[in-house]
Amino acid sequence: MQANRNLTNKDIARYSRQIIVPNVGVGGQCKLKQSSVLIVGAGGLGCPASLYLVGAGIGRIGIVDYDIVEENNLHRQLLHSEKSVGEKKVKSAADALKRLNEDLQVDEYYFSLDSSNALDVVRKYDVVIDASDNVATRYLLNDACVLSGKPLVSGSALQMEGQLTVYNHNGGPCYRCLYPKPPPPETVSNCSDAGVLGAVPGVIGVLQALEAIKVLLGQSGTLDSRLLLFDASESVFRNVKLRKKNANCSVCGENPTITQLIDYVQFCGSSPNDKDKGITLLDDKDRISAIELAKKIESDEKLLLIDVRMENEFEICALPQSVNIPITKMEKPCHVDEIKEEIKSKTENHNIPVFTICRRGNDSQKAVKLLQTICKDLGVEIKDIKGGLHDWTRTVDSNFPIY
Amino acid sequence: MTGKDGLNLLIEFSGGAELLFNKIKKHNVSLPKSEIPWTIEKLLVWIKDNLLAEKPEMFIQDDSVRPGILVLVNDSDWELLGQLEYELQNNDNVMFISTLHGG
């Protein structure tokens, strides 16, 4: 005899420990089997979130990611293995998930979500998980979820902290109700620049799966109108009360001005791709290449090479000739005299040129500008190394580590 | 105790906002006596003058917190309490959270 029309004997055996939880039951397990969840981002949040959704027996999941697996992803994006470096993240994630559950249907979307495709994708799912890593995608997903009436389980993580909220659900606010204006791009940090301890997005990603499951089961107690803050450094979870849906919200309010998707890169002043955001502050005459620097060092030319990265980055790897003065130190007026003195003593009274270097050649340009101010009227020549240490590895010494 | 007698507050910063405050997340502060009640608006100016270590534009813009910072009083969104006009009470806990976007 069939115990239930929708659950097979295999299902019952597999999910029994979950079915006997009163909050789930046979009805709940059937719902999960018939449900679909879209996960945007197969990274530090998307990997643990999809893992637990698949484990719980969600029938269909969609994964969106335009990226390929890199070595520096492996410490936190645990669906990807060493062998999948260089592979599409959606493919690598889908393969890993299907190994876990052969009944699973996985839809792979190997592209960057934007205004032209987001609604078509979002509409195909019951719940959306925002596991993305940038502001533009967060606004895009919010608007797409509001316009198509989907709950959005939004998580984020950086360094030792995580945040989690369910938007557009149960009369709670949407992302725009809370943040009508995007943050200035210079205030936004990402995992590639600021770092993240792998287990932190792990915690948040698993909680995103849990919230999505509760939303699908129609349970109360979801994180709508609330924000969960996780501070891993203190092992503290904090649950704070948020506003309700804002009647004047430009997308979910009573008289919305946003009735279709907009240009989110323009709105946020930053693009979804958080990697290699090259900036150009200096003229080419104020910059030299890594190869030119190597020649100068080889020919014993006198110079002062200032590495402007953080102390902990300098500790990872540094050129032996360099001294470390972090750019954050240069930015603080209280250190100006000290830095001026150090440069004076190390340049034989400003008679030898100064070069700044950083990881990719962005901060080194800012440092040139700062040092030009700090050392103005001293007539010292200051230039930066174009492309930074990444270019040093690429063009001079392939044994120099890249991070 | 009201603003007229001075106020003790716990001010907290998280999500990276603490970087502007010498990386210190929790600050126990005593606000001086004042004839005009202490509102969040007035507190922002006080924080800027007394706690902020660098880059004021990363914290305050147009006389309010910059976009992307959420303000909580005693674990509640300041929007529920009147935002800038909220009158602070003794022992209030005011938290400034910078939104995270990484994943």
Image (spheres, coloured by chain):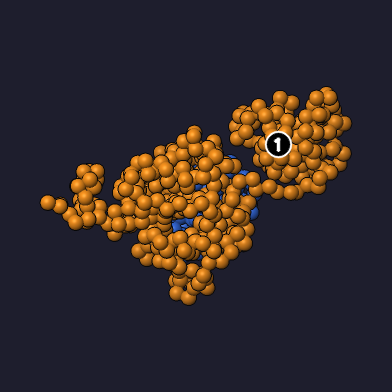
Let me know if residue A260 appears in the view.
yes
Let me know if residue A204 appears in the view.
no
Q: Nearer the viewer, residue A399 or A134?
A: A399
The chain letter of the orange chain reads: A
- Name the side, left or right, on which A383 lies relative to A190: right
Q: Quadrant of residue A10?
A: top left
Q: Nearer the viewer, residue A296 or A113?
A: A113
On the image, the x and y values in percent for residue A175 come to 47, 60
On the image, the x and y values in percent for residue A389 come to 69, 34
Q: Which residue is label 1 attached to?
A: A391
Of helix, strand and loop, which one carries label 1?
Answer: helix
Quadrant of the rendering where the N terminus of chain B is positioned? bottom left
| Chain to which the residue tagged by mark 1 belongs | A
Q: Nearer the viewer, residue A84 or A20?
A: A84
On the image, the x and y values in percent for residue A124 come to 40, 61
Residue sitting at the far left: A1
Residue at 37% across, 62% down: A169
How crowded pointer 1 is (Cα within 10 Å; few <14, some 14-19, many 20+) is rated as many
- Name the side, left or right, on which A277 lies relative to A177: right
Under mark 1, the amino acid is: Asp
Q: Nearer the viewer, residue A161 or B79?
A: A161
- Name the side, left or right, on which A64 lies relative to A97: right
Residue sitting at the far bottom: A255
Residue at 52% across, 37% down: A85
Q: Looking at the image, is A78 positioned above or below residue A316? A: below
- Name the side, left or right, on which A296 lies relative to A70: right
Q: Looking at the image, is A101 positioned above or below residue A296? A: below
The chain letter of the blue chain reads: B
Residue at 51% across, 70% down: A260
